[in-house]
Image (cartoon, helix red, strand yellow):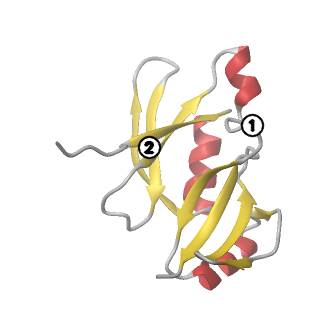
Amino acid sequence: MNQSIASIALLVRDYDEAIAYYTHVLGFELLEDTPLDDVKRWVRVRPAGTLKGSALLLARATTPYQHEAVGNQSGGRVFLFLETDDFDADYKNYSARGVKFIEHPRSETYGRVVVFEDIYGNRWDLVERQI
């Protein structure tokens, strides 16, 4: 049996705001934007050029509890890990596009890494692994 995680739900305030950030700032591609009813949409994005792997399902918060969790789905820890094969180029491009880095790039035993926050405050690692 072959299994994989297809999508990870990420709570957002607004679909269009989130699509704009993930596609224009982080350079992701919009895979799907399908209306499900008058207010709910099925919206998936993932890093451009990715042929396989999981995508983010942008899920608009609708309840007070969900609104409180926007930007803090992981209790303040790094939540998502974006691997790259060109750390320097991605760091430079993201910096130019206004991505909020909360530390300076550093080298670890597994590779180069830097933590950034997305539009909502979710923490991400940008990682280039050393093989």
Crowding at mark 2 (Cα within 10 Å: few <14, some 14-19, many 20+): many
Residue drawn at the location 52% of the way across and 20% of the way down: 39
Indicate the position of residue 122 as horizontal and vertical percent values: 71, 46
Residue drawn at the location 72% of the way across and 49% of the way down: 119
From what the image shows, is residue 121 above or below residue 26?
Answer: above
Residue drawn at the location 68% of the way across and 32% of the way down: 13
From what the image shows, is residue 106 above or below residue 42?
Answer: below
Indicate the position of residue 118 as horizontal and vertical percent values: 70, 52
Crowding at mark 1 (Cα within 10 Å: few <14, some 14-19, many 20+): few
From what the image shows, is residue 69 above or below residue 118?
Answer: above
Quick one: which residue is furthest to the left in this view?
A: 1
Residue drawn at the location 73% of the way across and 15% of the way down: 64
Which secondary structure, mark 2? strand
Earlier sequence position, callout 1 versus callout 2: 2
| Quadrant including the N terminus | top left
The kind of residue tagged 1 is Gly
The quadrant in which residue 42 appears is top left
Say whether residue 102 is left or right of residue 20.
right
Which secondary structure, mark 1? loop
Is disc 1 in contact with disc 2, using a CB cutoff of under 8 Å? Answer: no
Q: Which residue is mark 1?
A: 75
The quadrant in which residue 111 appears is bottom right
Say whether residue 81 is left or right of residue 114.
left
Indicate the position of residue 29 as horizontal and vertical percent values: 45, 58
The kind of residue tagged 2 is Arg
In the picture, the disc for residue 44 is: 2
Indicate the position of residue 112 as horizontal and vertical percent values: 64, 78
In the picture, the disc for residue 62 is: none
The Cα atoms of the two marked residues, 1 and 2, are separated by 23 Å
Q: Nearer the viewer, residue 45 or 35?
A: 45
